[in-house]
Image (cartoon, grey):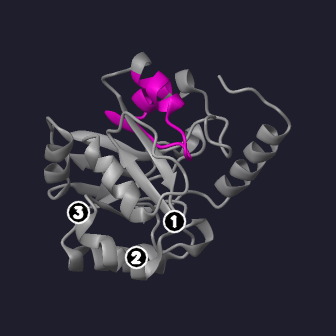
Amino acid sequence: MLDIELHCHTRYSPDSLVKLPDLIEHARKVGIHRLAITDHSEIEGALLAHQMAPDLIIVGEEAMTTEGELLCLFITELIPDGLTLRQAIDRVHIQGGICGPSHPLDPRRFGIGLENLLKYGPEFDFIETFNARIRDVGKNEETERIARQLNVPGICASDAHTLQEVGISRTRIREYTTPQDFVAALREAELIPHYSSPLVNVSSRLAAIAHSLGFDRD
C-alpha cells in the first residue's frame, strides 16, 4: 500500500517557503510514498522536484479558475489562470491528467462552492473531501457526503505549506499503473485525516510577507 500526500506547496507558491530538497527528504522520513506538489498556478517546482525524485513526486498544480481552485495531478503543462472550470477540466484531461476541486466548500480559500460542485461533480476524477487546514469541520463533512452522493472518490490531504504539515493527513491506496488506474484505486482508498494546528495559517502569512520582501526561490 502507498501513503500519498496529494496537496502540498513549496516556495514556488507565494505562501510557502519550503525548499524542494527539504521537502523530498522530509516526505521520505514521514513515510510518504508519493507526493503531489500542487503549487498555486505554477508547475516549475513540481517539474524540478520530479527530476530530483521521480519515484516520489507527482507533478501537480492548484490552478485558479474563474469559479475557484482546482487540484490538477499527473500534468505536464501549466493550467493557466483565468480559465473557466470547464476549460481547465478539459485541459487537464487532454494532457492525460486528473483533477478535482480543493476545499470546494471553503469560501475563505477560493472553493468552487456547492452549485459548481454539484454541476461539475460527474466530470471530476476525485473530490478533496478532507482538507487539514479547514477550520469549519462541517465543510469537510458536507463535502464527503456530496462526494458519496455523486459517486466520485474522495481524497484526504494536508494542504501542506510547511514541512511539519506534510503527511499529517494522507490517502492510502494500492499500487497503480496509470493516472486512470490511480482514480480506480482511489475508490478503495483508506483516508487518514488529521487536522493541522491553527498556527499553520500564521506560517503562510509570514511566508507571503517573506516573498513580498524579495526572498529568492530555490
| Label 1 CA crowd tier, 10 Å (few <14, some 14–19, many 20+) | many
Percent of width and height locating residue 168? 46, 49
Q: Give the residue displayed 34% in from the left and 28% down from the top.
A: 56
Residue at x-position 74% and y-position 43%: 207
Q: Is residue 28 magenta?
A: yes
Quick check: 130 left or right of 149?
Answer: right
Name the N-terminal-most of marks 1 and 3: 1
Q: Residue furthest right?
A: 213
- Residue 171 location (% of width, % of height): 30, 50
Disc 3 target residue:
153
Q: CA distance from mark 2 to mark 1?
A: 9 Å
Pick out the residue farthest to the top: 52
N-terminal of the two: label 2 or label 1?
1
Q: Which residues are magenta?
A: 24-50
Say which residue label 2 marks: 116
> How many numbered discs sit on the rendered protein?
3
Q: Residue 42 at what x, y percent from top left?
A: 54, 39
Against 1, is 129 above or below? below
